[in-house]
Image (tube, grey):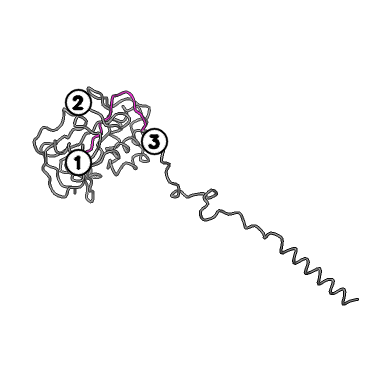
Amino acid sequence: MGRYTGLFAFGLFLAAAAVYGLLPADAPMDRPSPTDTSQATPGPMARAPSPTAKPADPPRGKGFDFYVLALSWSPTFCESEAAARNQDQCGDGKSFGWIVHGLWPQNEKGWPENCATPEGGRVPHAIGRDLLDIMPSMGLIGHQWRKHGSCSGLGKRDYFNLVRQASDKIQIPPEYLEPDTLLRVSPAAIEQSFIRANPGLARSGIAVTCEREKIDEIRICLDTGLGFRACPEVDSRSCRRTEIAIPPAR
């Protein structure tokens, strides 16, 4: 009887094994495949910008007609007597080229300045420090806010964000970016180079100013949305010399 019991048990084992073999295997853990991104959480660099995304609109000022962006050639200033009072811009080891002198609210005739504002006159370092690469001293930043930014209808942070956007908009022609030798050229030729480098900019919207026989500033007129626009009064103040000097970058 024991022999039959053993055979019966062995038969049951074989039957169970056959049934188990017909069962489906365990499903794998649910995880995204290498080409499945539906469940992935991309990092900051993994997300491509939307083809329809637009840059943020600049904050809109009010109470004036347009802006003048004044770009100053630092080597000219640093050869002047005033340089000794601005070591942040002209001290040892400093080597600035084009800097933002200011973004000035302007009217078709004349301009507002030193306006009353609930923002007060002092620019916190927390705001100014982000501009020191284009406006190299807190003294300049504070002065520009009090005289010009206060008339923009904007708060300090929005105004200086706009200064940055305006500066970033302008392309400096390569020949005037960092000249390492003294250049002598006509104001009209400088204007034409800036016009070629900045599509949409016209001769009636730019002025080259001079400090005696040297270049002083490039002044470019922008509407309140930072588009190029004409400005006859500003253009009329362009340097009238036939040739001016551009000192080399330090």
Q: CA distance from mark 1 to mark 2?
A: 23 Å
Q: Residue at x 31, y 31 (%)?
A: 149
Task: Name the N-terminal-most of marks 1 and 2.
Answer: 1
Label 3 packing within 10 angstroms: few (<14), some (14-19), many (20+): few
Quadrant containing the N terminus in the rendered view: bottom right
Label 2: element kind: helix
- Residue located farthest toward the right when viewing the structure as drawn: 1
Residue at horizontal 17%, vertical 35%? 208
Q: Earlier in the sequence, mark 3 or mark 1?
A: 3
Looking at the rendered structure, which numbered label has been put on residue 73?
1
Residue 197 in the image, given as x and y percentages of width and height: 23, 40
The answer for how far apart the CA atoms under marks 2 and 3 are is 29 Å
The part of the image, by quadrant, that contains residue 215 is top left
Q: CA distance from mark 3 to mark 1?
A: 29 Å
The location of residue 134, given as percent across then percent down, is 28, 42
Q: Residue at x 51, y 56 (%)?
A: 34
| Callout 3: SS | loop
Label 2 Cα neighbours within 10 Å, binned few <14 / some 14-19 / many ≥20: some
Q: Which residues are the magenta region?
A: 58-74
Secondary structure beneath label 1: strand
Tell me, for residue 83, which label it has, or none: none
Q: Nearer the viewer, residue 32 or 231?
A: 32
In the picture, measured across the screen, residue 18 lies left or right of residue 60, that is: right
Which three-letter amino acid code belongs to the residue tagged 1?
Answer: Trp
Mark 2 and mark 3 residues within 8 Å of each other at the beta carbon: no
In the rendered structure, which amino acid carries the disc numbered 2? Answer: Pro
Is 237 a magenta residue?
A: no
Q: Which residue is mark 3?
A: 56
Ranked by sequence position, the earlier of labels 2 and 3 is: 3
Do labels 1 and 2 touch, CB within 8 Å? Answer: no
Using the image, determine if residue 76 lies above or below residue 201.
Answer: below
